[in-house]
Amino acid sequence: MKRFLSLLLGLMLLSAPCLAEEDLSMAEIVESVDLDQPESGAWDFPVALADLDPDFVKLANKHYLLEKGYSATPLVTVKALKLNKDGSNANGGIRKATGSKMQLQEDCYKALVAMSDAAREAGYNLYLKSAYRSWSTQNTMYKNRLAKNKGKDDGWVSKAGASDHQTGLGCDVIPKSWLKAAGMNSKMASEPECIWMAQHCQEFGFILRYPADKEDVTEINFEPWHMRYVGIPAATYIMENGLCLEEFHDQLQEAIQKYLAAGGDRSQVEKLIQPSTD
Ligand SMILES: [Zn+2]
């Protein structure tokens, strides 16, 4: 906008007859047109390059399929929460909604434990229901869902490679009141635990991966329980600006192209480049 106004001002100066008599040389007029160009090769994006981990901001959806063996690493096993007598977390664990083994990428797991500890201090108990899922597990889930749904994809289960859970950074976190529920649906959003998570998740590096107002962009139904770890700087930017990961991804890819076009160092952004698999 600033650039446009500067250009407009420049054009007005050039065309204004009363100014033509004044002693304004062409060079002076051109000099006054501030093109507002970023410094050559400068990173012009709200999140610093050093704060963008290529795995943490990787997009997984049906247009950006993950490779079969991919996940962020290392994956660690989730421990069931044990509390000390004073109520502090004895083993760095989190309450589990099921008895089955669950894994998450290590930074994501630590952040989830920190979020769950903070929630408990605020009076809310969070339960981890689902964490990392391999490509093969997702493939089985998708086929089962299709079989149950007469071959129709209803948007509830992603196909293999398209699931945020394969990144090792996506997790389903639910309130106690939903532990016995047969399924999950958007009504969960009105539970105080989910309201708390939506307000505080970015402080721990999480975003709401499938927001209610972004169903047309994510192509996934609203999931108030699905948290995705992206790191605190990216999470803060995404949540404060009401974005979904797809929109953040588009902005980031555009910033990378601008940076490269302006002569930026390719080795600094190479791993952040993620083209569509369509
Ligand atoms: Zn999920």
Image (cartoon, rainbow, N blue to C red):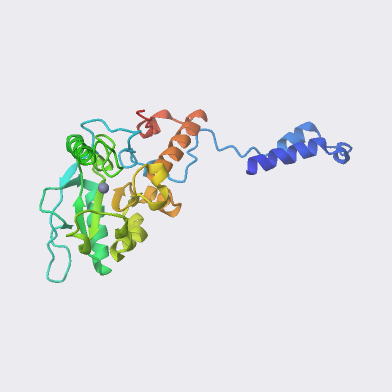
> Residue at the location (15% across, 51% down)?
78
> Residue at the location (26% across, 53% down)?
111
Q: Nearer the viewer, residue 184 or 236?
A: 184
Q: Nearer the viewer, residue 44 or 215?
A: 215
Please state if 246 lies on the left or on the right of 37 as rendered. left
User: Which residue sits furthest bottom?
Assistant: 86
Q: Position of residue 3 (x, y in %)?
A: 64, 40
Residue 266 in which image quadrant: top left
What quarter of the picture does the C terminus occupy? top left
Q: Position of residue 249 (x, y in %)?
A: 40, 39
Q: Is residue 125 above or below residue 140?
A: below
User: Which residue sits furthest front?
Assistant: 150
Work out whether residue 6 can be spotted: yes
Q: Is residue 116 above or below residue 215?
A: below
Please state if 27 lies on the left or on the right of 228 as rendered. right
Residue 245 in which image quadrant: top left
What quarter of the picture does the N terminus occupy? top right
Work out whether residue 33 can be spotted: no
Please state if 94 lies on the left or on the right of 61 as rendered. left
Q: Position of residue 141 (x, y in %)?
A: 19, 40
Q: Position of residue 236 (x, y in %)?
A: 40, 52
> Residue at the location (19% across, 53% down)?
129
Q: How many marks?
A: 0
